[in-house]
Amino acid sequence: MTQVVPNGSKGTQRAPQLETITVSRFAPFRGAAITTVNLLVFFVLWELVARTGLINPLFFPRASEVFSALYRGFEDGTILPQLTHSITNFLIGLAISAAIGIPVGLLMGASRIADLILSPYVWAMTSLPRVALIPLLILILGFGDAMQLTIIVLSAVFPIMVNCMAGVKTVDPSLLRAGRVFGTSQSETYVKIILPFTLPFVISGVNQGIARGLVGMLIGELLGGGGNGLGYLLDRAGEQFDAPMLYAVLLLLAVMSVSLIQAMRWLEERAAPWRDITRT
């Protein structure tokens, strides 16, 4: 406790002063503003480069033509049913992948026996190109949603599994020793120490699963979609040399991917607030 002596005395001490931090009221909107300006500059540069004619318009249309094709596609009902089909299948496949990959990955990380039994199959399927499975899946499941869901799950589940397994194996041993010192049981250690430490690995695995799952979704729709999905629109636009529609579908896929990744980041901030680091 600091003693303050009246002014004029030799032993006068100043009480410590708290530093005040001023936060601008526009701070919460800084990220959105930077993103908006960044995208605006990108599309303006795209439009300007396309207008110069240095690149054949058949391969590189103007940004305004892409947005016009996007608007017409939603207006005449060309895009929305295919977009809905792709998003529905992808979200169902991602949910199935998370429901399988997270518990199995955590089990492999916690149990050496489970790791020895399952890891050869997990690593083999992780490295296997998904496109090689399409003929077999079409032969077994035919064309349609069942085949598309299967290829999405096979693409997304193994990155989730591998990351969860790695997360458990990299838990700081000092945390486990501290838990034993305080008398935590094995179940309490898993719930209160291992799972919180592993959560970032789970989120990272789901993010990788999103990227791999989108690739699997497009492969399934391009090679065996039966005329449904964004992959089908992409294939049809390529066959018709419709570059604006081709770029419009790619833009939708990019927005879909970024939106899902941002949703996972938001979920991580809510589930693991201790990982929130102030960025300057």
Image (cartoon, rainbow, N blue to C red):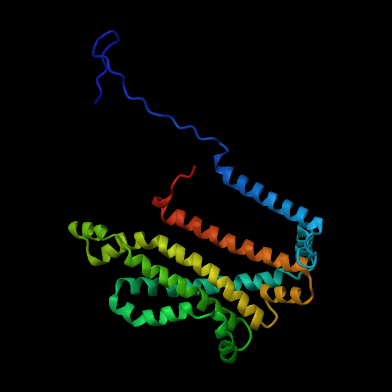
Task: Identify which residue is drawn at 25% across, 23% down.
Answer: 2
Looking at this view, name the residue that lies furthest to the front.
54
Residue 231 at x, y = what percent?
67, 75
Residue 224 at x, y = what percent?
64, 83
Residue 10 at x, y = what percent?
24, 11
Left or right: 35 as drawn, with respect to 263:
right
Looking at this view, name the residue that lies furthest to the bottom.
139
Which quadrant of the rendered structure holds the N terminus? top left
Looking at this view, name the residue that lies furthest to the top.
8
Q: Quadrant of residue 197?
A: bottom left
Residue 92 versus residue 52 in the image, above or below: below
Task: Identify which residue is drawn at 56% across, 84% down.
Answer: 132
Residue 98 versus residue 55 in the image, above or below: below
Residue 173 at x, y = what percent?
26, 61
Left or right: 87 as drawn, with respect to 171:
right
Task: Identify which residue is drawn at 33% across, 82% down.
Answer: 117
Q: Quadrant of residue 78?
A: bottom right
Label tally: 0
Task: Identify which residue is drawn at 28% across, 7% down.
Answer: 8
